[in-house]
Amino acid sequence: MKKLSIITFGLFSFIQLKSQTNEFLPLSRNGIGFINRSWSPQAQGCGHAGLAYSSEEEFNPMNPASLGFLKITDAEFGYSYKTKKISDGKIEITDNSGTLSYIQLGVPLRNSINEILERKEYKHNYAMSLGLSPLSSTSYSYIIIDSTSTGREARLLNGSGGLNQFQLGFAYRVNHLSLGINLGYVFGNLSYEQTFYLIDQSPINRDIFSDRYFGSGFKPEVGVIYEQLLKDKAESKNKQRKLGYSLLVSPGGNLRFLKNSFYRSELDLSEFGSIIDTLVYVNESKSKAQLPFKISAGISYNHRDKSGIMLDAGIENWASAKKFDGQRGDLVNQQYVGLGAWIRPDNSGYGNVFKRSQYRMGVFYDNGYLEINDEKLKNYGLTLGMGTSFNFQRQICVVNLSFEVGKTEIAKAISEKYFKVTAGIRINDNEWFLKRRYN
């Protein structure tokens, strides 16, 4: 009951902290906002690569097929802190923000304790997962001042909100081949407001245009992982070398949006109050948008659970995705690639803390899904990370820490140099959902 309470508390904390995220995202007024990707703790330190990664102790949210290899209940959550410098070529500002980045739970549906007692490895295995993570974020507030024939005109732009996704996953494994499916439910709201007024005019007359969208829909995806054992006859099970191949496909999904609009003119009469004139009022106008078709593939090599290397690449067809009514920005196809490696000097889990830790590093490149003034968004960077395990009786606790240094830019428009830290905790327990029996 306590464990279930921890998960429930985490879900409410995620929703609360998500609403409190204050990262300044100047480009998030385009598209559906800044896209947040759900990297596994392993991938966060390995250049965002890890689509083919699987483990008996760790669920990989990047690919639902990894559930087929899971043998111990896995509960995880992580928190991210980010500091960055934003420049438009004239002005540079510093922004700091943090948020709870993911919550996930993977549960094997076959009892691994019986597998040990029977001394026979199951050829078939299946598991399920639950997860909650941000899909996109909208957060900006800035003012633009122009000189016109009637005086200086100010334009104040504000945006907030975002889309989240709740995922339910299932996987079935036969020998070394696992097939998984994720059904994601996307929900959230996006708010945009523009205010126009003449600075030198008295009394001040403001024209305010407010649009708020409530979106929801489903986002399915199917994944597969195949592990090829490179075992010599002299090698034991815990000294196996493995190649992993993976594929992930999502047909996209339809999102339904309800739009509420309130356009008004406000004449500020100072101590006498304000006169408000409603220009437009729209209640729950309906429109639809599409999430893109995407396909990604990955390959990994695991050398006896002591070191490994991973490579991922993918594409998302945003250019053909339908936009909701009032959506800004030009969408283009997005490509990304990540390369990472890891090493673990002692894989027994009981040695010196520095020897039993896993050390990770990688690089990545992502061209984004937005195009502004014929320029495409680019994001690239370097990652480092580590994971340290602490073993208890029938329980394992792993503390993951990753660092990311990168740059996001659209030439001639805006650039961001950032440093991001993500800390996460993984708890494994093979007694979850087991009922004790007494003779």
Image: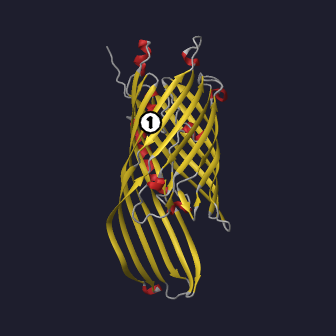
Give SS at disc 1: strand
Q: Position of residue 79 (x, y in %)?
A: 54, 45
Residue 382 visible within the image: yes
Please name the amino acid that badge 1 sits on. Answer: Gly
Badge 1 is on which residue?
Answer: 223
Q: Position of residue 75 (x, y in %)?
A: 46, 35
Q: How is the image coloured?
A: secondary structure
Residue 169 lies in what quarter of the image? top left
Along the viewing direction, whichever of 14 and 238 lies nearer the viewer: 238
Residue 17 visible within the image: no
Above/below status of 146 relative to 230: below
Q: Residue at x 63, y 46 (%)?
A: 404
Residue 48 lies in what quarter of the image? top right
For the C terminus, the quadrant is top left
Along the viewing direction, whichever of 60 and 394 lies nearer the viewer: 60
Q: Residue at x 45, y 79 (%)?
A: 207
